[in-house]
Amino acid sequence: MSFTPVASAYPATRLRRARATAWSRDMVRETCLSPANLIWPLFVTEGTGTEEPIASLPGVSRWSVDGIVERAREAVDLGIPCLALFPNTQGDRRSDDGAEALNPDNLMCRAIRAIKDALDDSIGVLTDVALDPYTAHGQDGLIDGEGYVLNDATVEILVGQSLNQARAGADIIAPSDMMDGRIGAIRAALEADGHHNVQIMSYAAKYASAFYGPFRDAVGSSGLLKGNKKGYQMDPANGDEALREVAMDIAEGADSVMVKPGMPYLDIVSRVKQTFGVPVYAYMVSGEYAMIEALVAAGAGDRDAVVLESLLAFRRAGCSGVLTYHAAHAARLLAKG
Ligand code: PBG
């Protein structure tokens, strides 16, 4: 929608009039936030009854599969429609080719099946497609002798990983690897394997960001990763290129697209939404979560207010939803009204 705001001059127009009372502010509010706009990322670990707190993400833990099912029930009760799963693969199951990603009995698949067995379609399960939780070198794909991440060979494995997850019951395949051409290849394979209603949410505009640190601790890749991911993730300086990424992924069959990280990239969210009109999601990433928790720990901000304001800003920018580690907390706040 595009229009030219017209205003009569002060004092005929006083924009503060509509702000003077809570009921009036409620009436003119342009954007709303509900638990349906939240996707809750969860980290899965081996064991039973296991909870492992993540030091760099205070308040976030890895859970064994039984705990993940409990979190899933909690999400349903809170009205959160979807979970995003990430595995912390045991060291002895990581390899240079990330083959554990193709194991139908890997941690991710066991978590998907357990959630779906317990809750069926009461909640959606979104699964990350990329090799970094499975590789011994921490890159998202296969590397050559120089450490260069190979595109086409990686796409082949990502297709296998996607089918593996879809067969275990994943509802939304979310490739976060930034290889060229993977959306089309994954879509074709899902169709051929009968998964017509399994969606793809493409991490279309994913930047080589310094805000991913705590996540790499959470999935156990931070100690393994040498170098960086700038050879495949986007340059934070680029905006037009994000539109090209999104255009290609939509053309290849993405049902929705993601921008990542979140708050420093709301201009990208807005441009994508206005240009393409597709469902856009943003990932408020681990470093953003940790910044808010650091603010709160320093006694310099009110968590509830900062979290709700941040999430509302994503909605204002054009997001259908936000992946956030604060999802359960925010949903509880929203339930209180
Ligand atoms: C990797 C992946 C990353 C995140 C989600 N998937 C990190 C990376 O690209 O190194 C980051 C999420 C976060 O920081 O919360 N496939």
Image: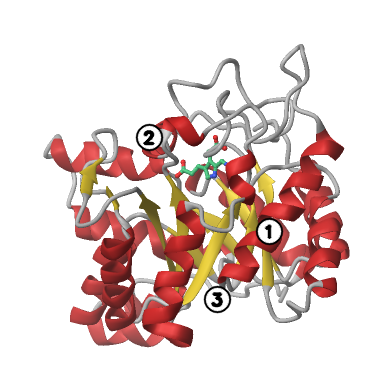
Q: Is mark 2 within 8 Å of ligand 1?
A: yes
Bin the neighbour count of mark 2 within 10 Å (Cα to Cα): few under 14, some 14-19, many 20 and up.
many
What kind of residue is marked 1?
Ser
x, y percentage for residue 29?
Answer: 41, 79
How far apart are the alpha carbons under marks 2 and 1?
Answer: 25 Å
Instruction: Read off the residue under disc 3.
Output: 8
x, y percentage for residue 333?
Answer: 22, 71
Q: Residue at x 28, y 44 (%)?
A: 292
Q: Residue furthest left?
A: 299
Q: Based on the displayed image, in which of its 4 quarters is residue 248 positioned?
A: bottom right
- Secondary structure under tag 3 reads loop
- Mark 2 and mark 1 lie on one chain; the one further toward the N terminus is 1
x, y percentage for residue 282?
Answer: 55, 57
Quadrant containing the C terminus is bottom left
What kind of residue is marked 2?
Pro
Q: Based on the displayed image, in which of its 4 quarters is residue 280 positioned?
A: bottom right
- Tally the numbered discs: 3
Q: Are the residues tagged 3 and 1 within 8 Å (C-beta)?
A: no
Instruction: Read off the residue under disc 2.
Output: 214
Image side of residue 257 versus residue 135, left or right: right
Is residue 98 visible to us here? yes
Q: Residue at x 46, y 51 (%)?
A: 86
What kind of residue is marked 3?
Ser
